[in-house]
Amino acid sequence: MLKPAGGRSSRGRGAEDGLFRAAGNGLGRCRLRDLRDLAPCIVGGFGGIVPRVRQQKLTGVRWAWLGGLMILVALIGQTVGAQSASTTSKLASIREHMERGLALFVAGKHTEAAAEFESGYAKHKYSAFLFNAGVAYQKSGDVDRALGKFQGYMSADPKAPDIEKVHARVAALEGIRAAKRLTPVTPSDAGADAGDAGPTAAAPPPIELDLDGTDSIRSLVVVETEPAMAPLVVFQKVSPGAQTFKYGEGHPGWKRIMETRSPTSLSLSEGRYHIVIDKFRDYHVSETDIDVAPGHVYHFKANLSQGVFMSFLRVSSNVKGAHVFLDDPEKRKPEWGTTPYGELVPAGTHEVLVEIPGFQPVQHKFELTNGEQKEVEVSLSRVGYGFLRIDGDAAVLKVRIDDKAAGVWRSGEPPLDLRATAGQHNVTVTAEGRKDFEQLIRVPAGKVLPIHLKLIPRFPRGTAWTQAIIGAVAGGAGVYLGLESEDLKEALEKDGANGILTADDDRVLKGQLFAAGADAGFVLGGVLAVLSTYNFIRDPLPESSHKADKSVEFEDPLNRRPHTGGKAVSVHRPRHRDLMARRRDQAWRKPREPEERGSFQLGPRASGSGAGFFVGGSF
């Protein structure tokens, strides 16, 4: 059977139509409640297409249509991930402002606390910040500002659960402000003498402000559902003896304080609450308890398809910026966050690993129930070792720690890092032509101590050696001349005894000269011996020294990656170019070695390098 050119058989069209009917059936069964529901629906639609694509051929147009759907799925996934990261970052910022404000409030710094709450509201428009600022100003005695914040709170959240109490608080504060503006009338002496001035006007009694029983600041509670727009009811426990809240039954001791739809944010005072996500479409009821403490931020999210609330986990430590790995003790995945960090997680058994260079890692295992808000506080302790980071102004430095060879540093190289146990160590550094450096240095635990050595050149001993040699020669000549003089004396005495000594014997003068020369040699040798000894001992140059910078944290390789938590501290390692520049600068400042110039002298000499009587010169 012939087929027109460019056409398709009815069988081919029917096959393609069948494919897209399968996709349409899959998509038609989806309930598109929000953007996050679209991706699984499209994937479900593809579930009907993929088996048939393997058996049928599609035209270019419909392949393009399928490609567009696949791109849409990828974009939706990225959008949802970005939204989740943005929410986590936003809540972390809100929590930071809230906790700082609370710390200032507890410390009695009420004006500073109010400013911190106002700063939080300027960035994140949540009414809890306004209420807390009002309480802080009220505590500080600034009634006008307190009124302004409470009135702003009522305008921002007119349906707040405590709106009636806030109205009463505002009325009471306005009464206090009016009372302060009244000036009491003091009776004058004239009026007192007249006796008929009538009774004296008195100021009205002070208005007691006792609305909540306490002036506790509010907490922020953020509630989300999947899908959104679910009906939400909030109950507050008003009776200490109230039984556990049970949905669908009578709940004496509990008060319904709010009805709204998700997502929502609540400004709640301290106490116990119960959140109920009512029946919504074909989803069942979800509920959870909340124990609210003052000045905190809580995040709840209910997965209505499972009928449970997700848990919220926050990990903090005594070291800001420590890396947190969740359910990944082998660290095969990227870090979950850096302390302090919190996020919604499924209920169940979890394990966190918290670590940062310079501290002992800590692992903690725990259970999370549905809707639980858990705070894990980890205390990190320093490792038992540290590093000395050594450089200096000599060409080559040889370092020994506790009389053991530790390493060699050469000019132009990065500083030498040497590991040692925490505590005091005897550090010895030697360099050719320089004085040795030896000192006890304390190695900090879990930190790096940079040390810059200044090794002083050894004081030259050429003058001392010259004096010693000339002194030895002079002393030897004195001995020789003395012996010759004694020999001549004995010969002259012998000839005199034999009667053969003549008056003009030249040996007499020669002996006298030898004796005088011996005496001069002995004197000169003795003087030079004393001077050479002094110059061997004398050292006008200072001893080698060091300069220790402030200790720094270990270098953290993970801090090069962006993360959502606090920033870890890293150690800056200077580049080679910077090191060379510093070496050139040190070369200009380096003390020059004393120079000795050759000279030939006979007689006394005084100079910066020595003093004495020189015969010949110094070398």
Image (spheres, rainbow, N blue to C red):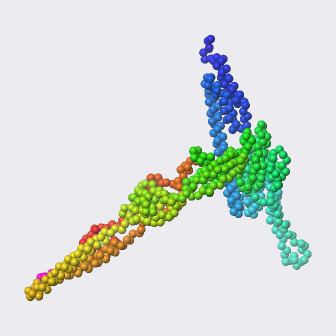
When asked about the image quadrant of residue 43, the answer is top right
Furthest toward the top, the residue is 1
When asked about the image quadrant of residue 190, the answer is bottom right
Q: Is residue 140 above or below residue 59?
A: below
When asked about the image quadrant of residue 8, the answer is top right
Q: Position of residue 41 (x, y in %)?
A: 69, 33
The answer to which of 493 and 531 lies nearer the viewer is: 493
Of the 4 image quadrants, the one containing the N terminus is top right
Q: Main secondary structure of the magenta part?
A: helix
71 relative to 250 in the view: left or right: left
Q: Residue at x 62, y 28 (%)?
A: 64
277 relative to 601 in the view: left or right: right
Q: Position of residue 370 (x, y in %)?
A: 72, 46
Do we see residue 201 in this rendering? yes
Q: Is residue 197 above or below residue 431?
A: below
Residue segment shown in magenta = 506-510
